[in-house]
Amino acid sequence: MRTYVIRRLLLMLPTLLGVAIIVFVLVRLIPGDPAEVMLGGFATEERAAELRKELGLDKPVLTQFVLWLGRAIRGDLGTSIINRRPVMTQLAARFPATLELTLISTLISVSVGIALGIASAVRHRTAFDLVTTVTSVFGMSVPIFWLALMLLYLFGVKGHLLPISGRVGLDVSLQPVTGLLILDSVLQRDWYALGDVLRHIVLPAVCLAVIPLAIISRITKASMLEVLRQDYMTAARAKGLPRRKLLWKHALRNALLPVLTVIGIRFGSQLAGAVLVEVVFAWPGVGRLVFESVQFRDYPLLQGCIVFIAVIFVFVNFLTDMLYAAVDPRIRYD
């Protein structure tokens, strides 16, 4: 097990190096000059050249990459071109918002998706199964930005049922401790703030949960149907085991491996794919920071955000592999 863990950790290095190279090159293909963006209407050629030299943008691309990579290995992702703040400082300030949104959306997608998948497998080829299948296909196909706008319009603008932007209302004075406002509200026993935070997170969390919920539901159903047809399940039914125990203890645990894989991949994807949701709902997370960095041609900030997301994605996949052995005792990493 220890050898496998060390090998997997070492294999992360070339993966992350490849990501860093691709990101560094692609970022510089974005149209526009950061110096001219910063100077705005005052961008004379002489002043722009001075600013490029100050920012190190006049050096060859390979030199820029080597210097940036050397700092990144030491935990320094550079300084934002626009606001002159360290990239790591901005990521540390924004990441709790994205993490909280992703955790809540994952909780929704996993709980509802697994429940619907099990129910569809048990009621296979019934009206319920047909409705669930059609709904799942729609959920996987719907564009997330369109869904976000529809939810915002129906429940926020038209219905006035839920807030349409931000993490917390202006009338709430909550002292941030962990950066996760739900947890901070509970720790401080501020129940009014907790209710307000939950109301703000409902729409973006539901929007972000729709696609993974549909995928998890389909995978759970397929995996459960395969398990329920096995001989050992027939023998368990013949022995008279209670239906609840048969489904939850025997069938679900054996069907959980492919579901766990999807959950791990989707969690990492949700962290990376929250850009549109965060922009639509004005959610102050890493996704919105990515959008702002593209908008202002902020090379160091954009590179830092994408590499940061890539590290998390790779680490989540690593943890998913480690969970396999906990779920299925037959799996051993020797």
Image: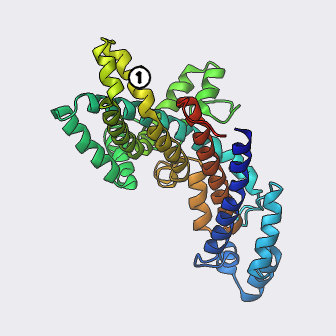
Residue 64 lies left or right of residue 263; in this view the side is: right
Residue 301 lies left or right of residue 196; in this view the side is: right
* Image quadrant in which you'd find residue 234: top left
Residue 269 lies left or right of residue 26; in this view the side is: left
Q: Which quarter of the figure is the C terminus placed in?
A: top right
Q: Nearer the viewer, residue 5 or 101?
A: 5
Q: Residue at x 76, y 59 (%)?
A: 77
Question: Which element carries disc 1, helix, strand or loop?
Answer: helix
Q: Is residue 13 above or below residue 240?
A: below
Could you tell me if residue 167 is visible in this image?
Answer: no
Decide: few, some or many residues near mark 1? Use Cα within 10 Å; few <14, some 14-19, many ≥20. some
Q: Residue at x 33, y 12 (%)?
A: 242
Which residue corresponds to mark 1?
250
* Image quadrant in which you'd find residue 17: bottom right
- Residue 193: image location, x then y, percent: 56, 26
- Residue 113: image location, x then y, percent: 38, 35
* Image quadrant in which you'd find residue 63: bottom right
Q: Residue furthest bottom?
A: 45
Q: Nearer the viewer, residue 201 or 230?
A: 230
Q: Nearer the viewer, residue 254 or 232?
A: 232
- Residue 270: image location, x then y, percent: 51, 47
Q: Residue at x 43, y 20 (%)?
A: 249
Total of numbered circles in the picture? 1
Q: Which quarter of the figure is the N terminus placed in?
A: top right
Q: Residue at x 49, y 30 (%)?
A: 198
- Residue 271: image location, x then y, percent: 55, 48
